[in-house]
Amino acid sequence: MSVFALGLNHTTAPVDLRGRFAFAPEQLVPTLQAFREKLQRSGEVAIVSTCNRTEVYVGASPSLLTPAVDWLAQLGGVSSQTLRQHSYVFEGSRAARHAFRVASGLDSMVLGEPQILGQMKQAVREADSAGTLGTTLHQMFQRSFAVAKEVRTSTEIGAHSISMAAAAVRPGVAAVRRSSRDQGAVRRRRRDDRTGGHAFRGAHAQGAGGGQPHAGARRETGRALRR
């Protein structure tokens, strides 16, 4: 039995097309079972579906690749030709190598992001629940998880990695911080302006008072002259 991977991701398809092939968790089991029926129960199937990729891993004869493309295209409401233009196919050892890269975060939009490993493990659990996970795919995925662990422990790829959600939030947080700093600067300028205005008015009042002697001071000066 051979393995092939059929998929599309952020490098091959625009977001609106990727959205057509995104599966909610509760959709995976019935979708896997329907695809298994399409293969006439002769193969193994697992689906990895995230915000940036949908990949169908199939353990079956390579002759089933065309039916797999047609089935996925129909599911997404596009032609097989459109799907082929925006997807990729890996077979045999190249399919396994691709799974290793995906699990390790090397194929992610944010290099090294850890969320994809959990999503792949969830895909394996869903395939197992659907009864479409056989020995071939099980061994390939378990090897993928081992490779991902080795990559993270023996390299620096995970040292500064963040999830896609965190990466999406960061620009907004930075914008809020800049806005807060700008507002703080404006408030400080206004406070300084008010303080400067009070000081100027106080000095002006003192100057005005110095130019017009106090009435008591004028009386003392008059008595001194009479003496």
Image: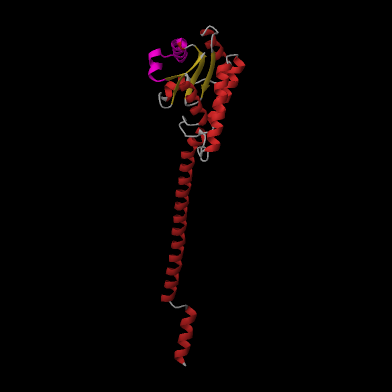
Where is residue 51 shown, x and y percent of the image?
49, 26
Taking the view exactly as shown, the residue that stands out farthest to the bottom is: 227
Q: Is residue 27 visible?
A: no
Taking the view exactly as shown, the residue that stands out farthest to the top is: 40
In the image, residue 94 sits, relative to residue 30, either above or below, namely: below
Q: Nearer the viewer, residue 101 or 154?
A: 154
Where is residue 205 shown, x and y percent of the image?
44, 69
Say how the picture is coloured.
Answer: secondary structure
- Name the side, left or right, on which 199 lies relative to 133: left
In the image, residue 195 sits, relative to residue 2, either above or below, namely: below
At 60% from the left and 21% from the top, the residue drawn is 125
Q: Nearer the viewer, residue 55 or 206?
A: 55
Q: Nearer the viewer, residue 160 or 135?
A: 135
At 55% from the left and 23% from the top, the residue drawn is 141
Magenta residues span 63-87
In the image, residue 39 sits, relative to residue 159, either above or below, namely: above
At 45% from the left and 59% from the top, the residue drawn is 192
174 is within the stretch colored magenta: no
